[in-house]
Image (spheres, helix red, strand yellow):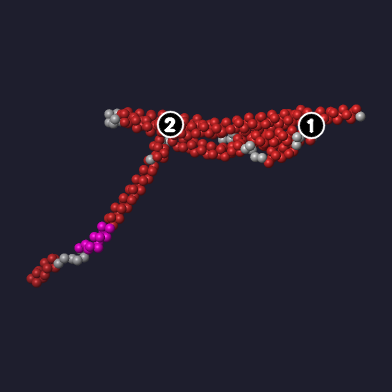
């Protein structure tokens, strides 16, 4: 028994090698901690970059302005699309219509109606299309032997009706620009009024807790963002509408003047043909 009692303290004092941490375990835990800290830093940096991206620039102002910013943004996208589409469509009006008109009038003066019609068919643009329509109507009625007064009336009516359809096609989508130029600023004003109401309500609730001037200035600044964006969208839409309308009005004047000159030459040709027919009838009756 004595020997067992003496041996037990010796066993308790002996250190356990498995319970002590080694140097490799310490290095691994330190490396894991360093990796974890780097991952947390990277995630924080990425989150900070994303938040900075959304909070800065036009996008930040858009998000800060509130609900009414999104209708204004949609109206702005629609206005840009309409302006691009109308610009590409109205580029055909920049053709040399004056030279075409002069060539057609010269051919009609020489009584070469078919050549004038073929020339108009080979050209692009609404003016050439209107001239070709009038010449085609004149040529058909003249071959059918209609009365000169009726031919003149039919030619004028045909060109006017055809011009109405072309003008309607040229004015397509322009009412959208007119609507956006009026609605976008109005939505901006509505957003500003709503923001001012909310701002003053918050000021009343925080009365005595914060500086009223600073709270009012911050709220009013945010409220005015919708008005600013509404004007940014409305002004280009208004300018685009007026620009395209002026181009179309100029085209209408050119078509009207061309139709008038064409009708004058047609009337002259019909009068000459009628006088020659009367002379032939008079000469045959005399014989």
Per the image, the residue denoted by label 1 is 146
Q: Quadrant of the C terminus?
A: top right
> Residue 34 placed where, x, y %?
28, 55
- Specify whether residue 21 is painted magenta: yes
Image point 40% across, 37% down: which residue? 61
Q: Main secondary structure of the magenta part?
A: helix
Q: Residues within 10 Å of mark 1 (few under 14, many from 20)?
A: few
Q: Quadrant of the N terminus?
A: bottom left
Q: Which residues are magenta?
A: 20-31
Please name whichever residue, 32 or 123, is drawn nearer the observer in this view of the structure: 123
- Quick check: 42 left or right of 156? left
- Farthest residue in the left direction? 2
Per the image, the residue denoted by label 2 is 227
Image point 48% across, 36% down: which residue? 76
Look at the image and tell me whether residue 154 can be seen.
Answer: no
Query: From what the image shows, is residue 124 above or below residue 2?
Result: above
> Residue 33 placed where, x, y %?
27, 55
- The picture quadrant where one finds residue 92 is top right
Please name whichever residue, 229 or 260, is drawn nearer the observer in this view of the structure: 260
Say which of marks 2 and 1 sits in front.
Answer: 1
- Quick check: 231 left or right of 87? left
Look at the image and tell me whether residue 172 can be seen.
Answer: yes
- Secondary structure found at label 2: helix
- Secondary structure found at label 1: loop
């Amino acid at each position: 028994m004595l020997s067992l009692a003496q041996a037990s303290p010796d066993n308790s004092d002996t250190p356990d090698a498995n319970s002590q941490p080694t140097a490799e375990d310490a290095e691994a835990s330190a490396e894991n901690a360093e990796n974890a800290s780097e991952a947390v830093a990277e995630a924080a940096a990425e989150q900070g970059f994303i938040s900075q991206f959304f909070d800065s620039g036009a996008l930040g102002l858009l998000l800060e302005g509130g609900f009414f910013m999104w209708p204004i943004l949609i109206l702005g996208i629609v206005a840009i699309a309409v302006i691009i589409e109308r610009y590409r469509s109205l580029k055909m009006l920049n053709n040399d219509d004056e030279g075409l008109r002069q060539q057609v009038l010269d051919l009609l003066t020489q009584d070469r109606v078919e050549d004038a019609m073929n020339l108009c068919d080979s050209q692009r643009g609404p003016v050439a299309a209107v001239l070709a329509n009038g010449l085609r109507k004149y040529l058909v009625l003249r071959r059918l032997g209609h009365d000169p007064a009726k031919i003149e009336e039919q030619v004028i009516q045909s060109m006017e009706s055809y011009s109405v359809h072309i003008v309607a096609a040229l004015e397509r989508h322009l009412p959208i620009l007119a609507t956006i130029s009026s609605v976008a600023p109005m939505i901006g004003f509505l957003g500003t009024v709503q923001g001012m109401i909310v701002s003053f309500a918050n000021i009343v609730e925080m009365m005595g807790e914060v500086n009223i001037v600073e709270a009012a200035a911050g709220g009013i600044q945010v409220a005015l963002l919708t008005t600013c964006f509404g004007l940014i969208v409305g002004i280009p839409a208004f300018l685009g509408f007026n620009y395209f309308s002026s181009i179309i009005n100029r085209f209408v004047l050119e078509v009207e003047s061309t139709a008038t000159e064409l009708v004058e030459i047609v009337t002259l040709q019909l009068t000459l043909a009628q006088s020659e027919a009367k002379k032939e009838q008079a000469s045959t009756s005399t014989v």
